[in-house]
Amino acid sequence: MQQFQIELDRRIRGVTLGVEMPSPQTKMDRKKGEKTLGILPREMQKFWIVLAQLVVEYNKEQEVVVAIDDDATKVSGADETSDLTALIVLHNLAYRRVEYASQRFWQIVREEFAGGDPNVHIALREGWVVALCHKQADKFLAQNP
């Protein structure tokens, strides 16, 4: 993962803010009763954008693996099986990268906004607002390790 951390840092540095905040899975409107903890710093906004990009890339790869798996079950030649195996290995690596980036993102956010307390539920909301939640939100939008 050290090589991936270098790639992650490079991608974060390359992000230009001003793009609309990506939200590939859910709306991020504030919920009733949530307490605002602060605004996500610019570098962490960039990290969020890269994390969202990684999720989109992972989902596209998943579609390819499923499509190839469907084809491989129809034609079970040695080449198709080895191609599918290679794709699954790459897909698993992409999943581990998303998990690593997500855990790292929320670890930093938790340290900055919740003193590192693992029992606090936090979430990211519209306008880059970091909010204290009553319960854990979507895994991608909130983290409670």
Image (cartoon, rainbow, N blue to C red):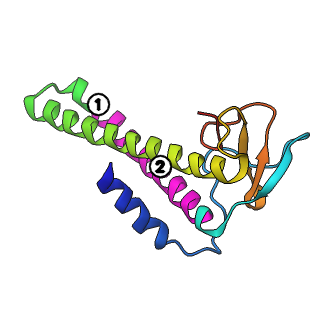
For the magenta stretch, what is the residue range? 45-69
Residue 126, located in which quarter of the rendered image?
bottom right
Task: For the residues labelled 1 and 2, say whether their Cβ atoms are less than 8 Å apart.
Answer: no
Q: Amino acid at mark 2?
A: Ala
Q: Residues within 10 Å of mark 1 (few under 14, many from 20)?
A: some
- Across and down, in percent, residue 138 comes to 66, 36
Mark 1 and mark 2: Cα distance apart in space = 27 Å
Residue in view at x 29 percent, y 30 percent: 69
4 vs 112, nearest the viewer: 112
Q: Amino acid at mark 1?
A: Asp
Q: Which residue is mark 2?
A: 101
Residue farthest to the left, as pictured: 78
- Across and down, in percent, residue 121 comes to 72, 36
Q: Mark 1 or 2 closer to N-term?
A: 1
Q: Which residue is mark 1?
A: 69
Q: Quick one: SS at disc 2? A: helix
Residue 34, located in which quarter of the rendered image?
top right
Residue in view at x 49 percent, y 56 percent: 53
Residue in view at x 27 percent, y 35 percent: 88
